[in-house]
Amino acid sequence: MEPLILNPSQYRPNSPGNIPFKLLAEDTGGKLSLLEWTLDPWQSGPFLHAHDFTEAFYVVDGELEIQLGERRHILGPRHLAWAPGGTPHAFANAAAREVTVLTICSPGGLEHFFAAQGDDPDSFPDVPGLGLRLLGPRIRATGAPELHPVEGSR
């Protein structure tokens, strides 16, 4: 493993698709993956799901509504949500402006899910070693106007 410096607009060149991973499992000896992502105003994130690895979500800017288990929480800048492995979770942008979030996964490997997903954001591929389980549809932020449907809900 070599030290690494990235500028704000840089991400790992071998990140899958256009997912902005700052660190891949291969960079950290499998210990973690780190990605910085955005959701457009009122956009829903992934389907309600769980997996074996742990995730931390740190809101850089904007507002994120996250469901952990049965409860929902609104997170603003500098808020953190911790989802231990096995925790059902989903999230959505909770405002009329973009939200930016850092996600740390431990152990690393989330990038393999996005590589297997390819160009189909509605697919939920089974990636060995991640323990992914699809549990329900995407969530819609509590205040989202009807003009913003939840795409890909099942």
Image (tube, rainbow, N blue to C red):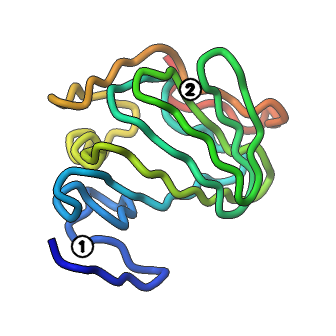
Residue 12 location, x and y as percent?
28, 71
Instruction: Give amino acid for label 1.
Output: Pro
Left or right: 58 as drawn, with respect to 56: right
Disc 1 residue crowd, few under 14, some 14–19, many 20+, Cα 10 Å: few
From the image, tell me which residue sits under label 2: 138
Residue at 56% of width from left, 32% of height from top? 151
Establish if 131 lies above or below 31. Answer: above
Residue 83 location, x and y as percent?
52, 33
Q: CA distance from mark 1 to mark 2?
A: 29 Å
Q: Which mark is residue 13?
A: 1
Instruction: Give amino acid for label 2.
Output: Arg
Residue 41 location, x and y as percent?
71, 52
Nearer the viewer's eye, disc 1 or disc 2?
1
Residue 113 location, x and y as percent?
27, 40
Establish if 11 lies above or below 57. Answer: below
Residue at 79% of width from left, 36% of height from top? 144
Quadrant of res 91: top right
Residue at 52% of width from left, 57% of height from top? 102
Q: Which residue is more in the foreground, 25 or 93?
A: 25
Q: Secondary structure at mark 2?
A: loop
Left or right: 83 as drawn, with respect to 59: left
Q: Secondary structure at mark 1?
A: loop
Residue at 25% of width from left, 80% of height from top? 3
The first of marks 1 and 2 along the sequence is 1
Establish if 73 lies above or below 39. Answer: above
Q: How many marks?
A: 2
Disc 2 residue crowd, few under 14, some 14–19, many 20+, Cα 10 Å: many
